[in-house]
Amino acid sequence: MDIKNNKSLDIVTLGRATIDINPADFKDPFVDSEYFNKFVGGSAANTSVGLAKLGCKVGFLCCVSDDSLGDFVISYLKQSGVDTSHIVRAEKGIMLGLAFTEVINGKTNLMMYRDENVADLKLDIKDIDEDFIASARFLLVSGTSLSASPSREAALKAMALAKKHGVKIIFDIDYRAQVWKSKEEISTYYTIAAQNAFMIQGSREEFDLMDYIFSPGMNDEETAEYWFAQGAEILIIKHGSEGSYVFTKEDKLKVLPFKVELMKATGGGDGYSSAFISGLLKGKTIEECAERGTASASIAVASSSCSAAMPDEKQLYDFIESRHREGQKVVYRV
């Protein structure tokens, strides 16, 4: 795989940053919880933190609120090693999205508060700097950014500039229902993004939404064959607690989760994404990337947070080695 390594940034991510409010003790339902912790959340923000902790040079493109919550997001990302120079502020009164999480009888309930006036969807086409995009090896675009204007046009401009400068595009489908208007709209814009990507990642349900108009009803193998014909090189199709499949044109891998005590069901996808992509950037094999991804996902779902739970390289290595000593094998060629 030809990945340019003469760039000042490894990756630029584009998508949402939110605030996660989690009970201090997940054993209590939200209505009975008295104490809560705040974290930076949002798929693109979590993935950015995860990549930075794993030693990658990360730049983040996002719009945040012009208030103390926006200050918190930028401060936390800076402390995590993310380049925040291209994060912009929304107009006064436009808020960040909020996400509240509870676990009831072992099932995670995620309550999201966002609409088309949320700050991350106010990223504008004028906020996309060509030199910033060109300075990266990868551009990761979160599908949530395509759900409304002006963020939609900003994301499309970023992808066009990435292609112009030979920057490889990763499309994280990242479906959130709150703003999308129809399945037809979802399928149309997801397809436009995916047709420009060398790597596409999402759940089986997310791929079904993307394929709704143009190629409905496909199974994993048919999905992989279809998107390889469109120019993709790597597909990750996730099946929740059952694990995931990683497809390249040469390989198909079944990837199981490592055994952990599940605390919540959120954050795993972002942990998977950051560790897998960091493996690509470090020249790891596809099997090593997959193992890194599922290890980071397992760490995240066993934690009370998302962004703060993203492991660094030593933590990731130690986790994998400890599971190897227990005889756990999670990546199978099929």
Image (cartoon, grey):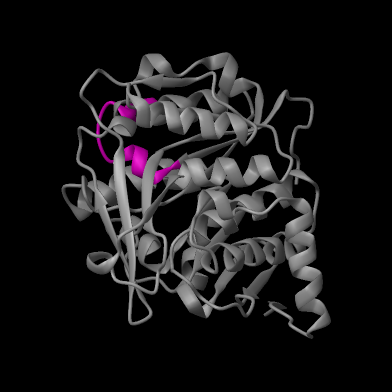
Query: Which secondary structure type mostly characterizes the magenta part of the structure?
Result: helix
Q: Is residue 60 visible?
A: yes
Magenta-tinted stretch: 142-154
Q: Residue furthest front?
A: 34
Look at the image and tell me in which quarter the C terminus lies.
bottom right
67 and 107: which is toward the camera: 67
Is residue 220 toward the left or the right of residue 30 in the image? right
Does 128 lie within the magenta span? no
From the top left corner, tell me how far across and down residue 100 is, in percent: 31, 55
From the top left corner, tell me how far across and down residue 140 is, in percent: 53, 39
Q: Is residue 289 above or below residue 125?
A: below
Q: Is residue 156 visible?
A: no
Q: Is residue 12 above or below residue 85?
A: below
From the top left corner, tell me how far across and down residue 74 is, in percent: 48, 28
From the top left corner, tell me how far across and down residue 308 is, in percent: 55, 50
What residue appears at the point 32 percent right and 24 percent down from the top-left corner?
67
What residue appears at the point 44 percent right and 31 percent down from the top-left corner?
72
Quadrant hosting residue 258: bottom right
Quadrant hosting residue 149: top left
250 and 331: which is toward the camera: 331
Q: Is residue 206 above or below residue 106?
A: above
Q: Residue furthest left?
A: 181
What residue appears at the point 35 percent right and 61 percent down from the top-left corner?
215
Does 146 lie within the magenta span? yes
9 and 95: which is toward the camera: 95
